[in-house]
Amino acid sequence: MKITVKREFFTDTETIGSMFINDKFFCYTLEDKDRMLHQLQIESEIKTQKKFGVTAIPSGTYRVILTLSNRFKRVMPEVLKVKGFSGIRIHGGNTHESTEGCILVANTKHINKPFGKVLNWIQGSTEVKLIKEINKAIQINERVELQIVY
């Protein structure tokens, strides 16, 4: 199964994009600020450019599995082997204040539309729907990969 996140809208605080599953539109995404990091950079270089809790993961290709999150106390998609990051999940949420490096997923996006102090946000979590799709792939022994592109 191929999950693609196409980063499309960039601000000083967040990155909004679209998620596709096997090249078919699935939902919208929201991540922290994209600092143009790439998976092929050496880890020390990534760590010097990264700002903890407010940086999107490097673009590239990663394996995704379902694991129990100690923080959220539920099974969630986990993005593996992200240089300079740990505990990266794909989950529901609305604003960059809820990301801490994770990828948020939702049905709708709002650009330049105030939501408290935030102008750009998403809503209508698609986390449960995404977990169902990942589970289908796992049941047929299909590898789940996430590709982050521009």
Image (tube, rainbow, N blue to C red):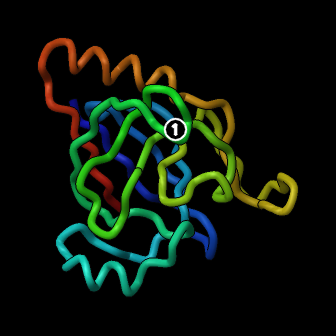
52 up-or-down from 65: above or below: below
Measured as percent of width and height from the top left, residue 52 is found at 51, 72
Q: Residue furthest front?
A: 70
Q: Tell me: 108 left or right of 46.
A: right
Question: Which residue is depicted at the point 43% across and 44% down?
Answer: 89
Count of numbered labels shown in the rendering: 1
* Residue at left offset 28%, top offset 44%: 146
- Quadrant of image for the N terminus: top left
Residue that mark 1 sits on: 91
> Is 11 located above or below residue 144 in the figure?
below
| Nearest to the observer: residue 52 or residue 63 | 52
Image quarter of the C terminus: bottom left
Percent coordinates x, y for residue 82 in the rendering: 28, 59
Identify which residue is drawn at 35% across, 20% down: 133
Find numbered disc 1 in the image and state the secondary structure of the residue it sits on: strand
- Taking depth in this image into account, of 19 and 24 the one nearest to the observer is 19
For residue 78, what is the image quadrant? Answer: top left
Number of residues whose C-alpha sits closer than 10 Å to that of mark 1, classed few (under 14), some (14–19) or many (20 or more): many
Give how far across and how far down residue 95 sits, in percent.
Answer: 68, 52
Amino acid type of disc 1? Answer: His
Where in the figure is residue 118, as x and y percent of width and height? 78, 60
Please name the residue shown 38% across and 76% down the image: 36
